Amino acid sequence: MAFLRYPLSLFLVLNVIVLLSNSVICDDKENDLLQGINRYRSSLGLPPLAKNDNAECLADEIADKLEDQPCTRAIGTVPEFSNYPDALKKCHSNVKTTKDGVILPVCVPNRVPTLVLTNYTHSPYATYLNKSKYTGVGIGSEDDWMVVVLATNTPAGNFVSGAGLAGMVGVCHFLLSLLLALSVVV
C-alpha cells in the first residue's frame, strides 16, 4: 500500500528500467543477427539455433583475429587465420568436437544489420543455414566483421571439450571445411 502514496515515483522507476533494458537490447547486433537467422530458419520450417557457448567463444576469437583485416577483399580470397588449435584450446574445444562445425565470416562496413543478415541468408552461406543438422550457433563480432559458427548436436560438431589429441583426419577435415566455407564469395 505504501507504493500507492508515491505513484509518480513508481512510474518513473519503472520507466527508467524499461528504457535501460531496451537500449541494451537495441545495441546488441549479435543478438539481432541471431534473431534474424532464426526467423529465416523458421520460414523454412527449421528449428531455431540455440546459443552454444564454445562456438561463441570460437566466433569471438576468429572475429578478434579478423579485426585488422580490411573489409574489401578480392573475389575468392580467404581471410587469413592463424593458430586454430590455440583458439580451440582457449575455448575448451578440440578438433574432434568441431570437425562438423562451420565458420562463416562476413565483412560489412559499419555492420549494418540488414546487410549482415542478407550476407548470410542470400548468399552461398544460406546452404548451411538451411540444414537441419545445425542446431547450435556462436556469434562474434569485431569492427566490420561478423562471424557465425554453426554447431551440430553430434559428438563431432558440438564444440564441447574432448579428451586427447585429435587425429590428423579430423584436423584436415575441419580445416578443409573451414577453407571451403571461407572461399565462398559473400
Image: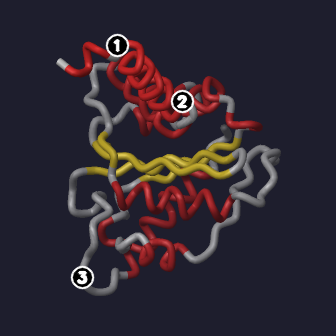
Q: Which residue is the site of mark 1?
A: 7
Relative depth, front residue between 139 and 76: 139
The part of the image, by quadrant, that contains residue 65 is bottom right
**Residue 164 location in percent, x, y?**
27, 86
Q: CA distance from mark 3 to mark 2?
A: 42 Å
Mark 2: give few (<14), some (14-19) or many (20+) Cα within 10 Å. Answer: few
**Label 2 to label 1, Cα distance in Å?**
24 Å
Q: Earlier in the sequence, mark 1 or mark 3?
A: 1
Q: Nearer the viewer, residue 113 or 103?
A: 113
Query: Residue 174: x, y in percent?
Result: 44, 65
**Badge 1: few (under 14), some or many (20 or more) residues near its Cα, within 10 Å?**
few
**Residue shown at 58%/61% (left/top)?**
62
| Dot label at residue 54 | none
Name which quarter of the figure residue 42 lies in.
top left
Please state which of the two labelled residues, at mark 1 or mark 3, is closer to the viewer: 1
The image position of residue 135, as x and y in percent, is 28, 43
Q: Secondary structure at mark 3?
A: loop
**Mark 3 or 2: the one toward you:** 2
Tags 2 and 1 touching, CB below 8 Å:
no
Q: CA distance from mark 1 to mark 3?
A: 59 Å
Amino acid under disc 2: Ser
| Residue type of the residue flagged with mark 3 | Ala
| Residue for point 54% across, 29% down | 23
Considering only order in the chain, which callout, 1 or 2, is on the residue closer to the N terminus?
1
Tag of residue 23: 2
| Image quadrant where one finds the N terminus | top left
Whether label 3 touches label 2, CB < 8 Å? no
Which of the two marks, 2 or 1, is nearer to us in this view?
1
The x, y position of residue 165, in whole percent, is: 33, 86
Quadrant in which the C terminus appears: top right
